[in-house]
């Protein structure tokens, strides 16, 4: 028996979410008194794989087949299912990101497992097995009892944190039964954005709404983002108006993000927007309307005109950095 965690890599490297998943899986494994096993697919150096041992992973399965780097959902789900069966996993943990959300249902069917997505903490109990997740865009919590022998969980970003627990880990070659027909996706060309922090990778995000009033008023917001090494985003009305590109739109109909720190300048906080940012660890809101819904979700709030407050933010950051 074991707890299996699938660890995605980006160009052969792990990110914070990778180690958060490892921490979460090893903590569940400790409560069940079973080993925590990680599966990595695609080319990753042993030095990178060994970093997982810092977070309690005692056994690491790796297959360096570069065809897995194409992120073919069907192929990865098949490999993860075989790893779960090989290790006798009673719980399989994935990230609640685009790849994890695509793989988890396939995996649950293959393993005849129960599935709970977007969990945000350790199981409330293991007998019975009860997990917790947010409902209604973060306005409530649900406790879900899983009755199946095998459980599949996707973990929301920034919901658990990193928990170091150094162990000695073995790195083993894992050879799932795959055929060429399993790999449906081929990467012909890759165009990467450079010189800009991607929203999916950003620990800090600076966002603007209609309170910014016009596209030409975005320069201070971009300056603050540059000072903080942050990503930039916006609410849907802003992207609809053409002030900012749709790629920066966050919310239920845009990107779902979970940074450590989220700045909301001139955003009223409609429920659709909050649905995309409610997993942020800390939310700082600036709005001239004291009754704006954003203040109900914010950890810190400033009632004031963005045009006056934002320059003060910039000066304060410059002073601290100097």
Image (cartoon, rainbow, N blue to C red):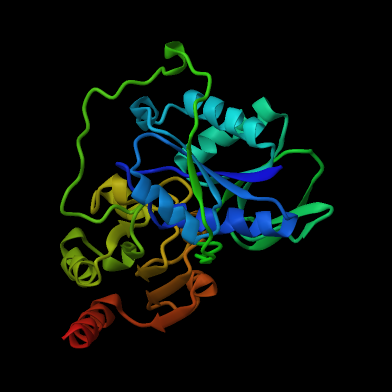
Tell me what residue is drawn at x 39 percent, y 67 percent. 262
Tell me what residue is drawn at x 53 percent, y 19 percent. 177
Q: State whether residue 273 is above or below residue 253.
A: below
Tell me what residue is drawn at x 25 percent, y 56 percent. 197
Name the side, left or right, on which 30 lies relative to 197. Answer: right
Q: Is residue 125 visible?
A: yes
Q: State whether residue 39 is above or below residue 163.
A: above
Tell me what residue is drawn at x 73 percent, y 38 percent. 150
Residue 89 location, x and y as percent?
67, 40
Residue 238 location, x and y as percent?
31, 55
Q: Is residue 273 visible?
A: no
Residue 234 location, x and y as percent?
33, 57
Q: Nearer the viewer, residue 140 or 244?
A: 140
Quadrant housing the N terminus: top right
Q: State whether residue 40 is above or below residue 18.
A: above
Quadrant housing the C terminus: bottom left
> What is the quadrant of residue 149 in the picture?
top right
Residue 77 location, x and y as percent?
54, 29
Name the side, left or right, on which 80 lies relative to 306. Answer: right
The total of numbered circles placed on residues is 0
> What is the quadrant of residue 143 in the picture?
bottom right
Name the side, left or right, on which 56 lies relative to 90. Answer: left
Q: Nearer the viewer, residue 146 or 226?
A: 146
Q: Nearer the viewer, residue 182 or 195?
A: 182
Q: Nearer the viewer, residue 167 or 28?
A: 167
């Amino acid at each position: 028996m074991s707890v299996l965690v699938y660890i995605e890599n980006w160009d052969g490297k792990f990110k914070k979410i990778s180690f958060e998943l490892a921490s979460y899986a090893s903590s569940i494994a400790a409560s069940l008194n079973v080993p925590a096993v990680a599966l990595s697919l695609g080319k990753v150096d042993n030095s990178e794989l060994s970093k997982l041992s810092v977070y309690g992973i005692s056994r690491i399965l790796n297959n360096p087949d570069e065809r897995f780097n194409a992120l073919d959902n069907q192929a990865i789900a098949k490999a993860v299912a075989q790893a779960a069966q090989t290790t006798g996993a009673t719980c399989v943990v994935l990230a609640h990101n685009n790849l994890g959300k695509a793989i988890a249902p396939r995996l649950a069917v293959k393993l005849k497992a129960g599935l709970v997505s977007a969990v945000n903490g350790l199981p409330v109990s293991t007998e019975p097995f009860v997990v917790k997740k947010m409902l209604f865009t973060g306005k409530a919590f649900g406790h879900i009892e899983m009755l199946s022998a095998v459980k599949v969980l996707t973990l929301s970003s920034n919901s658990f944190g990193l928990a170091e627990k150094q162990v000695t880990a073995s790195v083993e070659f894992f050879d799932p039964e795959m055929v060429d027909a399993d790999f449906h996706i081929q990467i012909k060309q890759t165009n990467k954005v450079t010189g800009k922090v991607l929203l999916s990778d950003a620990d800090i995000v600076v966002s603007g709404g209609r309170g910014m009033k016009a596209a030409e008023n975005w320069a201070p917001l971009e300056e603050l983002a540059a000072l903080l090494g942050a990503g930039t985003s916006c609410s849907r009305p802003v992207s609809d108006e053409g002030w900012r590109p749709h790629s920066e739109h966050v919310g239920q109909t845009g990107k779902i993000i979970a940074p450590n720190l989220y700045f909301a300048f001139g955003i009223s906080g409609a429920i659709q927007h909050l649905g995309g940012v409610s997993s942020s660890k800390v939310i700082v809101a600036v709005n001239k309307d004291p009754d704006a819904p954003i203040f109900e979700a914010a950890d810190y709030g400033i009632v004031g005109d963005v045009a006056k407050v934002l320059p003060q933010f910039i000066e304060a950051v410059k002073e601290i950095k100097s």
